[in-house]
Image (spheres, rainbow, N blue to C red):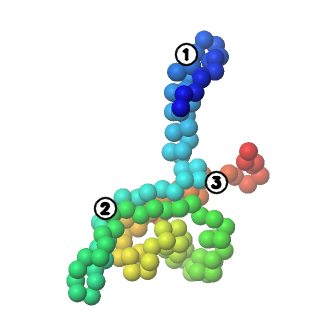
Amino acid sequence: MTYALPDAPDGLDPHEALELALSLLEWAQGEGVGEPEHVMLAYPVVTTAKDGSIVRTLTSVTVRRPKVRDLRDPKVLNAKSDMALGVELAKRLTGLPDHEFDALDSVDFERIGNVVAGFQSHSPTTGSSVE
């Protein structure tokens, strides 16, 4: 399929304008606006069967953006400390089963926690509007 490029303003070559627009779109998507983040694990989690055979090797984790339902979860609301809150929220946002989440190395958990915290830091401030 071929698209006709519109005339670019101020003498800008249409192909350059398209490349610029695509670069800006790629940059915006890279800012995590609504997109899940993928974390490569420094220490992969190996799940084994009872006979010792490897069932799965987890090398990366996808962390989705939190929704209000995540923040209203009783385990999140009733967390007794910042650490407990981080654990519960990270567990919900990764969707990992207990045995895999509990087997994460603390280095990888910290990286996942930084992603979760980053989602919160991109929130608009109180009183601002989002268009």
**Closer to the observer: label 2 or label 1?**
1
The label on residue 42 is 2
> Among all residues in the image, which is located at the extreme bottom?
50
| Viewer can see residue 19 | yes
Residue 96, given in percent of the width and then of the height, sits at: 45, 73
Residue 104, given in percent of the width and then of the height, sits at: 36, 72
79 relative position to 91: left or right: right
Task: Give the mark, 3 or 1, whose residue is nearer the N terminus.
Answer: 1
Question: Residue type at mark 2?
Answer: Ala
Q: Residues within 10 Å of mark 2 (few under 14, many from 20)?
A: few
Front residue (pair 73, 19): 19
Residue 100, given in percent of the width and then of the height, sits at: 38, 76
Q: Residues within 10 Å of mark 3 (few under 14, many from 20)?
A: few
> Among all residues in the image, which is located at the extreme left?
52
56 relative position to 12: left or right: left
Q: Is residue 33 above or below residue 21?
A: below
> Among all residues in the image, which is located at the extreme top?
11
The label on residue 13 is 1
Residue 112, given in percent of the width and then of the height, sits at: 44, 63
Q: Which residue does the numbered mark 3 point to in the structure image?
A: 123
100 relative position to 53: left or right: right
> SS class of the residue under badge 1?
loop
